Image: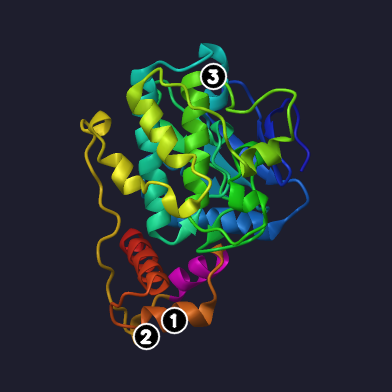
Amino acid sequence: MMMKNYHIVCKGSESTIFKVSPIDNYVMKISNNNNIKHITKEINAIKLLRKHTNIINYIKFNKNNIIYFPYYPQDLYSYIEKKNKIPYNECINIFYKVIDAIDFIHSLGLIHCDIKPENILLDEKLEPKIIDFGHLTISKSFIQKGTLNYNSPEMCLGRIYDYRTDLWSLGMLLYIMYYGCFPFYEKKESIRNQIIYFSKKIPKKNPNIYKIIKSLLIINPKERKSLRSIKEMKCFEKFSKNNYYREPIHVPENIMNEKIIKILTNIGWNTYSIKKQLSKKINKTNTDIMVQRSYYILNQMCN
């Protein structure tokens, strides 16, 4: 696609985001390698996730697989660079909204897999918007994704990981927001090894920040504190609490919406499994519940 007078806002391994004119209030995202599958996955993921106010929504997309997004003046990374480190009250405000959005993503059986300051946009009021769902993963995986500095120990080791890999990334995110640097030693072993054998002492400058980071940057993923537990901490008491884990509904196969099933398939679920799980009555199987919950959200938005 040929354009004049545009400037690149961000260039990643899979896609490029650019702005055509300084006065435009939108940006365009285009695949670097005409990777239609990657763009289709992102469009369909946003269709499901945009219900949450702190997750980006697109303006439109066209047949050339170009996605149009609202323009935001800065991302969290540039804001940290400008401030050097973010003051406590701002940290708490931004971080709560981010973890609430990630909690919503997890409630649907999805893992973001690339949480970092560059993937969190900020508006003029410092309201965060999570972006970039190209690495979105369903349930479990063993493939290393995202950005090394934010990868969990289990991901670095090539082990099977689940939603708890995002918890580690959130701990790293809060550390950078509040302290203005990574919790790594300079001129020591590789970053990868420092993550796998994480031993950096967390500064106790603020007891709440310390407690949150300490509960997330734990090598054993089973010992990391859940986002629901963190959201109940006293430092977050001013925020309204959302429960994304309500019971789903049973969907008879004869009234299943094929358009919704196609969206779920494009995100990564198997069509046969979707229909099988949707037709089941409510049970205790996490995968079944999460597929039903995803279908329910999309069905509400379509009506």
Q: Earlier in the sequence, mark 1 or mark 3?
A: 3
Residue 62 visible in the current orientation: no
Instruction: Name the residue nearer the viewer: 141 or 160.
Output: 160
- Rounded to the nearest angstrom, the CA distance separating label 2 from label 3 is 52 Å
Three-letter residue code for mark 2: Glu
- Identified at 67% across, 41% down, the residue is 148
Circle 2: element type: helix
**Horizontal and vertical percent position of residue 215:** 41, 40
- The disc at residue 86 is none
Magenta region: 258-266
- Identified at 64% across, 45% down, the residue is 146
Three-letter residue code for mark 3: Gly
Front tag of 1 and 3: 3
What residue does disc 3 label? 180
Circle 1: element type: helix
241, above or below 297, in the image: above
